[in-house]
Amino acid sequence: MAQPNSVKMVEICRVAPKPGAPDLLSLPLTYFDSLFLRFPPVQRLYFYELISSSSSSSTGTDSVVLAYLKTSLSLTLKHFVPLAGNLTWPQDSHTPILSYAQGDAVSLTVAESDADNFDHLSSNDVFLESKAYHPLVPQLEASHERAAAIALQITLFPGRGFAIGTAMHHAILDGKTSNSFVKSWAHACSKQIENGFSIESDISLPEQLKPLYDRTVIYDPTGLGLESIYLNDWQNLDGPNNRSVKVWELKAPPDDSVRSIFEFTRAQIQTLRQMVLEKVSDPVHLHLSTFSLACAYTWVCLVKAQEIEAGKVSVQAFSVDCRSRLDPPVPENYFGNCMMGAMGFAEAKELLGEDGLVVAVTAISETIKGLDKNGVLKGAHELYFSKIKDLLQAEGIYSTAGSHRFQIYDTNFGWGRPKKVEVVSIDRTGAISVSDSKNGGGGIEIGVVLKKDCMEAFASLFAEGFGDSFGKHRVRG
């Protein structure tokens, strides 16, 4: 088997917004942003295969691929200027500030794999060492005084394809905004390939991708001063007056950890829905969406695979996009964070029981049903960051990263849809990654990182729950 980490660095360059961008721009963080001030960056990895016809064409050689990606990145940054800037927390400022000044640029690492392992790394049918992707994603530059907004990496697999790795500062972008940026970059690149645009050419973005920087659309309906509560909490953490913007460094996963992706087809989701409906007399109160069912089933499989003690209370946390849940609603193209966490609780012994799926769905449903207008912020003033860090990697406590609604697999840079997309950073946060399925058809993918023996148990439980008609999840070395 090819070694998954045989990667050499070719260059580290800086890509600035195309000339014509504002000379100076600054955005204060809102309370939604401040909530994630020192959270670890989200690292995502996109694999693209260059099929034989394109790899031999004028747009499919490694040098041309790299040129298109660099040029289109500069064009895209003209629309996303703040992402070339840095996050600081000046002594004379109440809030941290994302600032861009002329000359600022995004760090772009270019690397090359010297091993023929593209197919192995981009397959969904294998268990990979959890650290196999680490050489393919960039590290975000961050100190106590200053933190970069994003970092990018392009890894070339000569004759096979390429991978794009991203690291996004969570206090600057939520999942929807980071997805919009990458899709904007993909849009610009594909238009360049299609029309032969040069660096002198501007790229217009579809309306849904144009970022809105107006901070006045974010307000605090609780009247409790969430911004001050969060910022005071951060300052008192290892404080007093600790204005550090350095992101948390979470411990690495155990050496025997592996990662894998599992797919829920539309038929499997319907099977889960039917399983629940057959066991409840009044399903009206249940939220039987694709996400709720997939999340509930995964939760039950994890509790069983990790053999969580029956006496423990297990937690399934997930992110909620607040844009449409505030009154008035926040525009969908708002740039920044506009999300909160929600949590479902259930006793492990109930999740381990015969009706575990119903228990999990009920817990998630009750949480979602409570998210009425502005109800999404209920209890938001009671978050304590000193406790959150310890909970991120605790057994029996699960969270999600991403959303199937982002339609990640529609991210086409001009060489087709991704062969695979992974959230690399879940190996440290312990989260479950969620995305649409690369096979389409209304399916959903979840990604997990577990110790190898737990992963084998999880894969078996995942397959057995649907019976032989859906087949076993394939496992190779």
Image: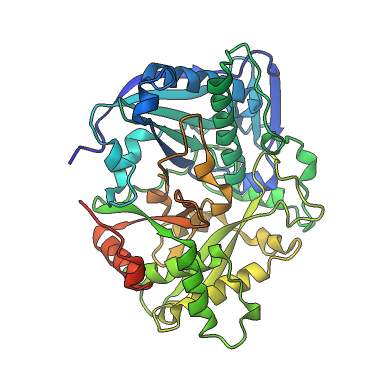
Residue 371, position in %: x, y? 69, 65
Looking at the picture, how far across and down is residue 285, in whole percent? Answer: 65, 78
- Quarter where residue 113 is shown: top left
Rendering coords of residue 375 (x, y %): 72, 64
State whether residue 460 appears in this view. Answer: yes
Observer able to see residue 307: no
For the N terminus, give its image quadrant. top left
Which residue is more in the foreground, 119 or 28? 119
Indicate the quadrant where residue 287 lies.
bottom right
User: In the rendered view, how is the structure colored?
Assistant: rainbow
Residue drawn at the location 30% of the way across and 43% of the way down? 131
State the residue at coordinates (24%, 62%).
453
**Horizontal arrangement in the rendering, residue 154 relative to residue 258 (left or right):** right
Foreground pick, 32 / 187: 187
Q: Residue furthest right?
A: 328
> Quick check: 232 above or below 246?
below
Outermost residue to the front: 53
The answer to whether residue 447 is left or right of residue 160 is right
Measuring from the top left, give residue 127's x and y in whole percent: 28, 52
Number of numbered discs visible in the structure rendering: 0
Q: Is residue 291 left or right of residue 227?
A: left
